[in-house]
Image (tube, rainbow, N blue to C red):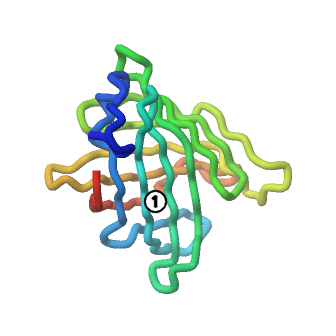
Amino acid sequence: MSSAGQTPLNPAVVPLAWMLGSWVSEPAGEGEFPTIAPFRYKEELVISHVGQPMLNFTSCASDPETGKALHRECGFIQIKPGTSQVAFICAQNIGVVEIEEGEVQGEQLTLTSLSLNRISFAKEPYVEQISRNFRLTSEGKLVQTVSMATSTQPLAPHLHVTYRRLSS
């Protein structure tokens, strides 16, 4: 499964190959948090590789009605060779950079933040913890759930999105 022409998949990331592809939210993703009104969003997610022992990750969220850009993330997903231990390195357009670690078990990846940094002029309340789960359903859909804690709120559900694969 290669998203970079004929570049072979690095053997280190074979346990994550089920994530590869271009994905689109279907239906719209849903967001919530105790301090904000519930919202919906469209998201395009691309998980690709270039033969290195990591996957490349980009996501672009937009308003499902207007198409206005909302949130962007880019980063990398690495696996410690010979283990199920995974690291996710992610930069967000809101000025947050995070390192999450966790474990892949079959077609499910569970991650929790180890480190979060932000730009000096980030808005309060500050994000202090993120946990995410990716899983592939028996119907071939990719589901991502994200929980978040801020400087004023404990860890709580934040995002839920189901993606349909556009291409592998």
Check the image and name the residue furthest to the front: 6
Pick whichever, 116 or 22, lies toward us: 22
**Residue at figure coordinates x 45%, y 31% from the top left:** 54
Q: In terms of image quadrants, where is residue 29?
A: bottom left
**Quadrant in the picture for residue 8:** top left
Q: Could you tell whether 68 is left or right of 142 in the image?
A: right
Residue positioned most to the left: 138
Query: Pointer 1: what residue?
Result: 159
Q: At label 1, which amino acid type do we have?
A: Leu
Image coords of residue 27 (percent x, y) = 31, 72
- How busy is the neighbourhood of tag 1: few (under 14 within 10 Å), some, or many (20 plus)? many
Q: Residue at x 33, y 50 (%)?
A: 21
- Circle 1: element type: strand
Residue drawn at x 51%, y 36% as measured from the top left: 88
Residue pictured at 31% horizontal, 69% vertical:
26
In the image, residue 1 sits, relative to residue 53, either above or below, namely below
Camera-side residue of 167 and 62: 167
- Front-lying residue, 121 or 59: 59
User: For the view shown, which residue lies furthest in the bottom direction?
Assistant: 66
Location of the N terminus by quadrant is top left
How many labels, in total?
1
Nearer the observer, 146 or 152: 146
Picture coordinates of residue 111 (x, y %)? 45, 36
- In the visual, does 137 lie left or right of 2? left
Instruction: Estimate the x, y position of residue 128 in percent, counting from the top left.
Output: 66, 44
